[in-house]
């Protein structure tokens, strides 16, 4: 009984070797692609965090620049008013 089962398995393995190999290769590719997808998602999250940090830094610098420009405009306007009032 056992030898007949082994013979049947050998026959099936030889007969369907291409299909078994194809399934194994497809499963290996599926696992590889899944791992690559996970790695790319991690990289995307890292890039998005870096982009968010850069955006926050830019906004802070822009706000400081705008405030300084506003102060300089006000100072210039005061100076212009002083010059006009002296005339």
Image (spheres, rainbow, N blue to C red):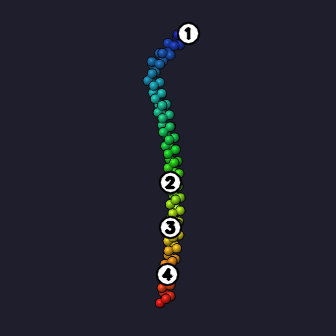
Q: CA distance from mark 2 to mark 1?
A: 67 Å
Q: CA distance from mark 1 to mark 3?
A: 88 Å
Residue at mark 1: 1
In x, y percent, where is residue 43? 50, 45
Residue 54 place in picture, x, y as percent: 50, 56
Residue holding disc 2: 51
| Contact, mark 1 vs mark 3 (Cβ under 8 Å) | no
Instruction: Name the residue at 50% across, 47% down.
Output: 44
Mark 3 or mark 4: whose residue is earlier in sequence: 3
Residue 50: where, in percent of width, then height?
51, 52
Q: Which residue is at a point 51% across and 73% down the rendered structure image?
A: 70
Residue at mark 3 to residue at mark 4: CA–CA distance: 21 Å
Task: Check whether the beta carbons of the residues at disc 4 and disc 1 lie within 8 A of each other.
Answer: no
Q: CA–CA distance between discs 4 and 2?
A: 41 Å
Q: Are marks 2 and 1 in contact (CB under 8 Å)?
A: no
Point out the tag, 4 or 1, that comes first from the N-terminus: 1
Q: Secondary structure at mark 3?
A: helix
Residue pictured at 50% horizontal, 54% vertical:
51
In front: mark 2 or mark 1?
2
* Residue designated by label 4: 79
In the rendered image, which residue does mark 3 sit on?
65
Using the image, determine if residue 21 lies above or below residue 71.
above
Q: How many angstroms separate mark 2 from mark 3 (CA)? A: 21 Å
Q: Secondary structure at mark 2?
A: helix
- Towards the viewer: 51 or 28: 51
């Amino acid at each position: 009984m056992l030898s007949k089962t082994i013979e049947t398995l050998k026959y099936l393995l030889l007969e369907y070797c291409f299909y078994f190999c194809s399934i194994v290769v497809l499963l290996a590719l599926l696992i590889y692609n899944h791992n690559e997808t996970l790695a790319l998602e991690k990289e995307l999250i890292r890039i998005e965090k870096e982009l968010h940090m850069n955006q926050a830094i830019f906004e802070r610098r822009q706000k400081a620049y705008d405030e300084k420009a506003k102060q300089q405009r006000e100072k210039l306007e005061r100076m212009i008013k002083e010059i006009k009032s002296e005339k």
